[in-house]
Amino acid sequence: MTTPTPATPSVLTLTKEHGAADLDGVTKMGIGASWDATSGTSGGFMGKLKKARGTDLDAFAILLNGDDPVRFAGLDVTDPLQNGAVTTTGDNQTGRGDGDDELIEVTFDKVPAQVTSIVFVCAAFKKGSDFAKAANVSFKVYDSTGGSTAQVADIWPSLLGSGNAIAVAKAFRAGASWKLEVINERGTVKQGDQESLLRFAMGR
């Protein structure tokens, strides 16, 4: 588990209605995905056993040039640009414990110019995983500018909709700076299919 330093400022729950948030002055941002396991509809001993084993969701950052995906971070791809610009903490397969289960960090001044936007996706991507067996899914936004880390926002996905994936948010260039907007759209990707995942992020 990766647990950044607790926030000191007030935390805003971001929604689509807020529009794009200006990241001017933010040099490093993190998005942490967390969830709890649920036994679903089964009860008794088997339900408790499934909850103990946990639930496997995966967080991804899809890097785009226009509408074309050019790199992605997630699973065992922890530094796709090989310069520390976009990194992940790796694959948490249970969702157990406190803090963020998976964390993606972006250092904006290291992102090459050909990357025009970054779409953050959470999915039950691996075969056999099930989004319906995850409860209290949450995405925390951190500002790590200047070496200290503070939570500045929360994104709570809607419980409505279907599919095994959710496009959470998008960071995109706005002149010399970046902006962050909430997407919060559910959909379906073919489990284990990288192309299906990348296409899900396109056009967001």
Image (spheres, rainbow, N blue to C red):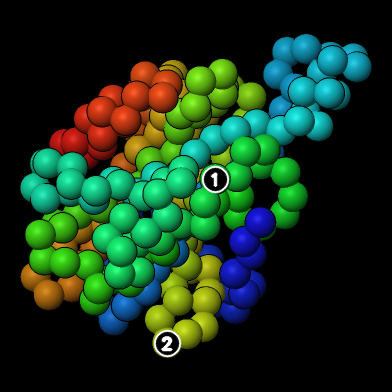
* Residue occupying the point 27% across, 60% down: 81
127 relative to 199 in the view: left or right: right
Q: Residue furthest right?
A: 45
Amino acid at pointer 2: Gly
Nearer-the-camera pick, 89 or 137: 89
70 relative to 12 in the view: left or right: left
Crowding around mark 2 (Cα neighbors within 10 Å: few <14, some 14 to 19, many 20+) is: few
Tags 1 and 2 in contact by the CB under 8 Å rule? Answer: no
Q: Is tag 1's residue or tag 2's residue first in the polypeptide sequence?
A: 1
Nearer-the-camera pick, 173 or 87: 87
Nearer-the-camera pick, 10 or 200: 200
Q: Quadrant of the C terminus?
A: top left
Of marks 1 and 2, the one in the foreground: 1
Q: Position of residue 147 (x, y in %)?
A: 47, 85
Q: Which mark is residue 91?
A: 1
Secondary structure category for the residue under label 1: loop
* Residue occupying the point 28% across, 25% down: 196
Crowding around mark 1 (Cα neighbors within 10 Å: few <14, some 14 to 19, many 20+) is: some
74 relative to 52 in the view: left or right: left
Secondary structure category for the residue under label 2: helix
Find disc 2 in the rendering and name its residue.
Answer: 146
* Residue occupying the point 31% across, 64% down: 82
* Residue occupying the point 35% across, 38% down: 167
Image: 21 above or below 196: below
Q: Quadrant of the N terminus?
A: bottom right
Image: 27 above or below 201: below
Q: Does residue 19 show up?
A: no
Q: Position of residue 35 (x, y in %)?
A: 62, 41
Image: 88 above or below 203: below
Amino acid at pointer 1: Asp
Which of the 4 image quadrants contains residue 166? top left
